[in-house]
Amino acid sequence: MDLLTHNRSMARNNRWSNDRLYRAVLALKPGEFEALRTSFFPSIKETLNHILGVDHLYLDFVEEGGLGAAAADDFVDFDDAVELAAAQAASDRRLIAFCDRLQHHDLERRVMTDRRGDGMIPERIGDLLAHLFIHQIHHRGQVHAMLSGTSVEPPQLDEFFLDYDLRLRRSEVERLGLGGAD
């Protein structure tokens, strides 16, 4: 597998993982979404909003959208889990579309990243995508752990890449239209 295919697969994994996680979040009892918990961000709601806000920032960077830091600064948190889930799904589809448009040479291409007081820093698109995927995984893991203290069982999030796992995820992959990464 080459790096371009890997990034396309990671974007699809991101969509699948978020779908599984949000299906659990949407099954929470009233009050559990916003309840205070022990984590880097003090609730499932705040953590999921953070993931989406950072997605907006990094997508703006790699797409050269021109918003810069304002992509995160102007992000307005969602109070409603259903609306947040829909916004995350749209962002995930945007990331998949971006990765599908990439060519091998794009991964080495540098784009400007607005780091506020630290200035405009050129970064490689491949490195920005790697950071974005790690960021998403990191904070999804926190939400996964927080779900352990709720009425909903945390979903399995590591059954995506192996042929062996396809039997466990086939209907979800088809429902989400995630074929075509390989």
Image (cartoon, rainbow, N blue to C red):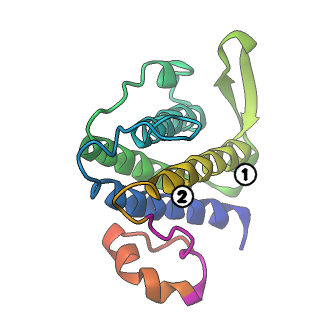
Q: Is residue 112 above or below residue 116?
A: below
Residue 161 among those drawn in magenta: yes
- The spot of residue 67 in percent (x, y) is 50, 21
Other residues around mark 2 within 10 Å, as few (<14) / some (14–19) / many (≥20) = many
Q: Secondary structure at mark 1?
A: helix
**Residue 3 image point, x, y percent:** 72, 62
Going from N to C along the chain, the mark reached first, 2 or 1, is 2
Residue behind mark 1: 105
Q: Is residue 162 left or right of residue 17?
A: right
Front residue of 5/140: it is 140
* Disc 2 element: helix
Stretch of the chain drawn in magenta: 154-164
Question: Looking at the image, which residue sits at the far top?
Answer: 117
Q: Nearer the viewer, residue 134 or 5?
A: 134
- On residue 3, the disc is none
Q: Which mark is residue 11?
A: 2
| Quarter that holds the N terminus | bottom right
Residue at 44%, 51% (x, y): give it.
Answer: 92
| Neighbourhood count class around disc 1 (C-alpha, 10 Å): few under 14, some 14–19, many 20 upward | few
- 62 and 172: which is toward the camera: 172
* Front residue of 24 and 182: 24
24 with respect to 162 (left or right): left
Q: Reply yes or no: does residue 88 show up in magenta.
A: no
Mark 1: which amino acid? His
- The image shows residue 114 at horizontal and vertical percentages of 64, 20
Given the image, on which type of amino acid does mark 2 rest? Ala
Count of labels in the image: 2
Report how far apart the C-alphas of labels 2 and 1 lie in the structure: 18 Å
> Which residue corresponds to the image point at 43% horizontal and 43% vertical from the top-left?
44
